[in-house]
Amino acid sequence: MTISNGERRFQELLEAAPDAIMEVDSSGTIVLLNAAAEKLFDYPRDELLGRNIDSLVPDAVRGRHAAHRAGFTAHPSTRTMGRGMILAARRSNGSEFPVEISLSPANTPEGFRVTAIIRDVTDQRNAEDVIRRANIELEARNREVERANQLKSEFLASMSHELRTPLHTILGFTELLKEELEGPLNEKQHRFLRHVHQDALHLLALINDILDLSKIEAGRLELHRETFDAQTVIRDAVDAIRPQAESKEIAVDEILQSAVTVYGDRVRFREILNNLLSNAVKFTPAGGRITVEAEESGGLIRFGVTDSGIGIAAEHHEAIFDKFRPVSSTTRGVREGTGLGLAIVKRLVELHGGSIRVESELGHGSRFHFTIPAGDPGTRTQPLILIVEDEIAARELLAGYVEPNGFRTEMSATAEDALVRARELRPDIIALDLMLPGKSGFQLLRELRELPETRNIPVLVTSVLDEEEIQHLEATEFLRKPVNREALLKAIRRHLPKRFAII
Ligand code: ADP
């Protein structure tokens, strides 16, 4: 038989291929192989030719391999690299190594043949092992760091607590002494006592801040949320700071919408305002101006505390929210305060589900903005739909259906997150997928129906299940997946609170 040029070139190509290539017949006998196969299995070519391929797999899987081979011959199909069957191969000296194999069957004039391309993946496996081990180590280290952090917060919390008791004693006795009930004090003694009293107060403020921050960081600070009028709290906070502002001839204005109801923790909200206002007074020179604003915008109240003070350089805009990061001195040139105020403010705002940022330029005043969820949903101008769905594409599809029709959306990928958001934002409608990772949509629905603040929110269940299977649930309506846009919009409009003009 003469060999054409093309055939010779093809043979040379096979011979030079970096992967081992072998052809076996229906009984598993090797009938053809290239140089890479000799090298990979460490046999001379004539020892491989005529040998059964089963002898090239480890002893432990040899029996299974023969069965696999028979199965492949009965139902031949091309299998690509990486989806091969043999995961370990055996060299002439008995050593084993991992391989990836691709198989392609062919009916030739000589009968049924299978071509196997075999690649040694030892290096790849080793690299994967290194990464896997590094990941495991990293996870363990992360857990350790988390635990250490938790312990640190717990330690700080208990230590702060212990420190407060003797401090209150110091403050109490200094105040008694100052009242001179136990006998008169001279001017110098009064001055000394003032120093003791002032520093004890400062220490108490610092300890209270550390206690607050460590509680927040240990996840132990609970918000007592309620719907309340932010106006009265703002007025109280402004009235409290006014004497300090007036002593520096700083004007304080409020610009408020008629009704500013928020849903949050009244005491913590006041703490946020106190911190921002006292900073504003501290860092504003005499004759300046401070403005507090609040306006509702799509389910959130946006607050602003603006001053005409010394300002903050752009490179410090993030650092000021870190712990113990004072970046400038007060207008009296001293470093007052604990350096914890803004760190606490930021965490408190975030606990409420809001965010805070600063706009400022050195020498041109500062403006702190923060958001807190609106309280009475009646102040919302756009209906809010909470989409609970773990698949991103499905989530975005629903949002894409409703947003152009005048609805605002919020998303949750888990039942846990959805419950927190439903309580915080009190959406007008919830679109709920039942199949969620972890806690199911069924459980979430039960919990929503139990909580007084979420009990009356209409829930549209989106599911691939038949309505009969889920009609025992306390859902407002069922929508079969894939959800039809018109059906969804109609259902939403049917259950939308009456105060929204039909959009
Ligand atoms: P402190 O107790 O030092 O005020 P904060 O955490 O409240 O700590 O603030 C951190 C730092 O941010 C302050 O020391 C100050 O440098 C800067 N800062 C905060 N508020 C203002 C403001 N209104 N104007 C200018 N600088 C400010």
Image (cartoon, grey):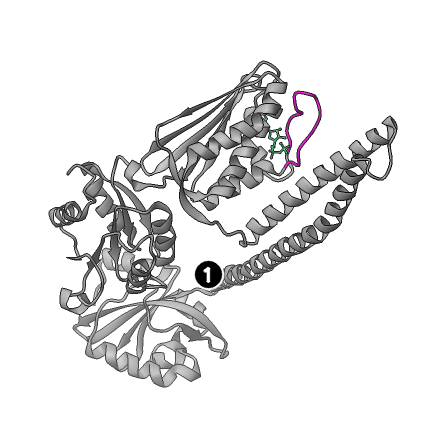
Residue that mark 1 sits on: 124
Judged left or right of residue 291, residue 467 is left
Examine the rendered structure and indicate whether residue 396 appears above or below residue 283: below
- Residue drawn at x 42%, y 74% is 89
Q: In which quarter of the image is the C terminus?
A: top left
Q: Is mark 1 within 8 Å of ligand 1?
A: no
- Quarter of the image with the N terminus is bottom left
Query: Can residue 219 be spotted in the picture?
Result: yes
Seen from this angle, which residue lies furthest bottom? 63
Q: From what the image shows, is residue 397 above or below residue 42?
A: above
Counting from the top left corner in percent of width and height, residue 249 is at 59, 16
Q: Where is residue 170 in the image (x, y as percent from the top left)?
A: 77, 44
Query: Residue 302's spot in the image, x, y percent?
Result: 40, 32
Q: Which of 94 and 403 is in front in this view?
A: 403
Quarter of the view holding residue 11: bottom left
Q: In this view, does 367 lie to the left or right of 1?
A: right
Note whether residue 283 is visible.
no
Q: Is residue 121 above or below residue 50?
A: above
Q: Residue at x 22, y 47 (%)?
A: 398
Q: Is residue 411 left or right of residue 360?
A: left
Q: Is residue 305 left or right of residue 433?
A: right
| Magenta run includes residue 431 | no
Rate crowding at label 1 as few (under 14), some (14 to 19) or many (20 or more) other CA atoms within 10 Å.
few
Ligand 1 is located in which of the four quadrants? top right
Residue extent of the magenta highlight: 326-339
Per the image, is 328 magenta?
yes
Instruction: Name the chief secondary structure element in magenta.
Output: loop
The residue located at (57%, 34%) in the rendering is 275
Label 1, secondary structure: give it: helix
Front-most of residues 29 and 47: 29
